[in-house]
Amino acid sequence: MYTTIATTLTDEILTITINRPDKLNALNKDVMTDLAAALDEVYNNADIKCAVLTGAGPKAFVAGADISEFTTLDKAGGLDMAARNQKNVFDKIENCHKPIVAAVNGFALGGGCELAMACHFRLASDNAKFGQPEVNLGLVPGYGGTQRLTQLIGKGKAMELMMTGNLIDATEAHRLGLVNEVTTPENLLPRTTQLLQTIISKAPLAIAKVIALTNIAALGAADGLQQEIIAFGELFDTKDAKEGAAAFLEKRKAVFVGK
């Protein structure tokens, strides 16, 4: 079905692996097309409760864009590429009602760092490296890097990293809040799966609201608190909220159905 990614569905978790290890999993048109299709599957397949995004091989999550595709671009082409991929991949990840988590193994540079930042949160192997080195090409990040990096680590450090093009290791990324947790390469996917299994056990509609409301907060929306109040009220009409309260009072594990 896919030519540049591999997908595996196990225990309601879809693992999406960018599979160009010989190119350090660099993003090109085919990768973007495949990712967009895989994300449609996440959105529409009820058997998928959440997803993991990772890269094939030991060296890279995604080492950046395929620069060979840049050589023929002009202003119109650059605008089209950034807008299309932002809509079909990066924004689709960020706004997905199901959790999508990045398991960052190795290099996450340029578009790779942006891909990881579009995910709801990130785990990294201890050999991971992060950076937005677009200034070395005479460019700026085009897939949300200036916005999401600033949201995650703050204006000053984001400015420094994007203006210098310097890379940071997993330990520094964790200290800055770019990644939630650092572990060994061998434990990266098992640990990510463990966290997602915990999330799967919670109420799906509540998880979807958490994602949406947190995204609103990250944008600094003026009506964020009001949106939270509305969501809080709406969830009282769900079967899951009634089940959650009943299970708590009966001292048993809740069984949520997403309704």
Image (spheres, rainbow, N blue to C red):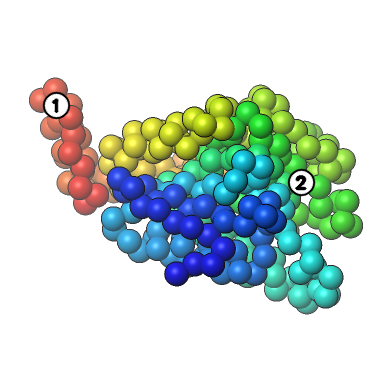
- Viewer can see residue 163: yes
For the residue labelled by badge 1, is the local secondary structure a helix, a strand or a loop?
A: loop
Q: Residue 27: horizontal and vertical position, in percent?
A: 66, 60
Amino acid type at circle 2 is Gln
Instruction: Name the residue at 61% across, 69% down.
Output: 30
For the residue labelled by badge 2, is the local secondary structure a helix, a strand or a loop?
A: loop
Q: Residue 211: horizontal and vertical position, in percent?
A: 44, 45
| Dot 2 alpha-carbon crowd within 10 angstroms: few under 14, some 14 to 19, many 20 or more | many
Q: Nearer the viewer, residue 231 or 32?
A: 32
Q: Which mark identifies residue 252? A: 1
Tell me: 164 left or right of 155.
right
Instruction: Name the residue at 56% across, 32% down.
Output: 185
| Dot 1 alpha-carbon crowd within 10 angstroms: few under 14, some 14 to 19, many 20 or more | few
- Viewer can see residue 216: no
Which residue is tagged 2? 132
Q: Quadrant of the N terminus?
A: bottom left
**Distance from the alpha carbon under mark 1 to that under mark 2:** 47 Å
Q: Nearer the viewer, residue 11 or 229?
A: 11
Instruction: Name the residue at 56% across, 55% down.
Output: 18
Tell me: 54 left or right of 160.
left
Instruction: Name the residue at 60% across, 46% down.
Output: 57
- The answer to which image quadrant residue 253 occupies is top left
Q: How many marks?
A: 2
Q: Residue 176: horizontal and vertical position, in percent?
A: 67, 28
Amino acid type at circle 1 is Arg
Q: Residue 74: horizontal and vertical position, in percent?
A: 83, 75
Is 76 above or below relative to 42? below
- The earlier-in-sequence mark between 1 and 2 is 2
Q: Nearer the viewer, mark 1 or mark 2?
A: 2
- Cβ atoms under marks 1 and 2 closer than 8 Å: no
